Image (cartoon, rainbow, N blue to C red):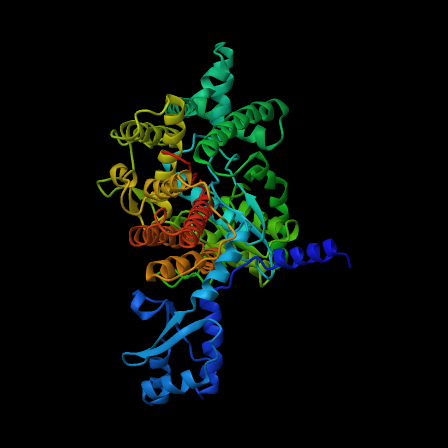
Amino acid sequence: MTHDLIKASLIIVLALNLTVMNIRKLLDQRFSLAFIEAGLPENAPTVIKPSSRPEFGQYQANGIMGAAKKLKSNPREIANKVLENLAIDDLADKVEIAGPGFINIHLKPDWLSNQLDTAMQSDTAGVSQSKNPITVVVDYSGPNLAKEMHVGHLRSSIIGDAIVRTLELVGHNVIRQNHVGDWGTQFGMLIAHMVDQQNESADLSVKLADLETFYREAKQRFDDDSDFAETARDYVVKLQSGDEQCKALWQQFIDISLQHCEDVYQQLHVSLTRDDVKPESSYNDDLPDIINDLDKQGLLTESDGARVVFLDELKAKDDKPFPAIVQKSDGGYLYATTDLAALRYRHHTLAAKRIMYFVDARQNLHLNAVFLIAKKAGFVADNTSLEHLAFGTMMGKDGKPFKTRTGGTVKLVDLLNEAEERAYALVAAKNPDLSDSEKKEIAHKVGIGAVKYADLSKNRTSDYIFNWDSMLSFEGNTAPYLQYAYTRIHSIFKKVDDYNADASIQLEAPEERQLAVKILQMEEVIDQVAKDATPNVLCNYLYELAGNFMSFYEACPILKAEKTVKNSRLKLAKQTANTLKLGLGLLGIETMERM
Ligand code: ARG
């Protein structure tokens, strides 16, 4: 082999290995072996955790006490036995027993700096690719197209998008499905109103630019005028039987409504496009087939003329099985029927192994029923993972669902514009010398980032209170704080002209070691977020990372340090910035070089 070829093949090998170890997993493996050697039960949990204080090392193994209790023996004695059998010299320079039987692990600076170098060469901050990538369908956003998107669509859109980006980073084949509501009785009323407006020679495209008002007018007429309501119902029948003229009007409405959504996605930095839209209407032709199939399998019961699947698994308080209606007595189909067709499509056509629904917690019973029926009917495989990743409600200051001052629903675009305006005022006050277009661009990233981060950093399943002041603060666990930390690191590099990326990383000070370990923990954090769909875990991590950086920055001068130390610290700073940018990027939050 020529020299170049050898070099090339070495680079390929290196490229394949550009991922860091999941420290927690690695320690778990080592301790599991030592547990077995020490005579502990085979599946005794090692309980590896990051340490709470640097004096205790970087990680702790807390599983000894539990195992000792089961064996009814002395935990410190067992801890000693475990340590005798522990092979860990390559990773740790000190392992000690503390308290009743905790084990503190001090990781070796050399090993850490090697891992960091690996992370720095990869464009995923060292985060490793899944060993068994699968096809994952992610169902999120899913607005109803009869109206404009409102604040109720925020959580699904941004939480779903963060998880999509995370799953893609670790190498899964992710298929986004925007299950928009574009079919149903509301559209009859909208078409009827369109026809009348056209007859009155109003400019439809102008009228439809404000969908909210258009919807309200149509609804008002539907409620007040029985002739109009009658016409509206006729249009529904016509639409569903494929009437060309009706369909064309409906399509015009849908196109405009989707354009509204796309504008919101773009402003919100959500990655959904027109290609990801798989509307309810697209399943229309499958619905009779779904009913037939359920019937053939003996899953259907007639109840007051409707067709129902009774589910013993979902018993109500009265102990009666839950009735999932799949066809109404007038022959019409329901939301659930469409969801069954969607599941069948996602399994058969898209070949999904994992299907994730980012849908409001209030739809839990609906989705559970649909999942059960789909499994019983074989619309999905037994081992297809069906997950409802529920979320709570965004509340106003009064602790009630977020509304306008007059009690109406808040359009999402209005909320986002307000965020940008508020951020603009902050940016202008902080940095008056910026040009107006720069201020606007920064305000966009900060304002949108703040709204998203305030939501993503909360426990997904709880309700939370929306608060402008706290989300836009430059202190605390907020997007502006993290974005600012990123720009600060950037400004350090502006003062350096001799940065050497090949320098070795030295981890002498405890703050340096702590920061190094924190950077490397991105791997385990991503692992967890991809598994549990919990963006708040990533937010907390980024917040701690920024905090660790600040402590390091205070304790360890960078620019004044001697050359090798300076370069080592610059590398730590650089990798902190890379990790912050990657992490915020996964949350769909943009960073900037100055603000
Ligand atoms: N359009 C529904 C709504 O606004 C959400 C759709 C969720 N996805 C699903 N497959 N059901 O409530």
Q: Is residue 126 visible?
A: no
The number of discs equals 0
Instruction: Name above or below for residue 478 compared with residue 133.
Output: above
User: Which quadrant of the figure contains the N terminus?
Assistant: bottom right
Q: Residue at x 43, y 72 (%)?
A: 92
Percent x, y for residue 585? 46, 44
Q: Is residue 571 visible?
A: yes
Name, please, the residue furthest toward the right. 1
Closer to us: 107 or 109? 109
Left or right: 294 in relation to 458: right
Percent x, y for residue 472? 29, 38
Tell me where residue 283 sits by quadrant. top right
Name, please, the residue furthest toward the left. 398
Q: Residue at x 62, y 58 (%)?
A: 14
Instruction: Name above or below for residue 327 compared with residue 207.
Output: below
Instruction: Name above or below for residue 517 compared with residue 191.
Output: below
User: Which quadrant of the figure contains the C terminus?
Assistant: top left
Name, please, the residue furthest toward the front. 562
Closer to us: 450 or 519? 519
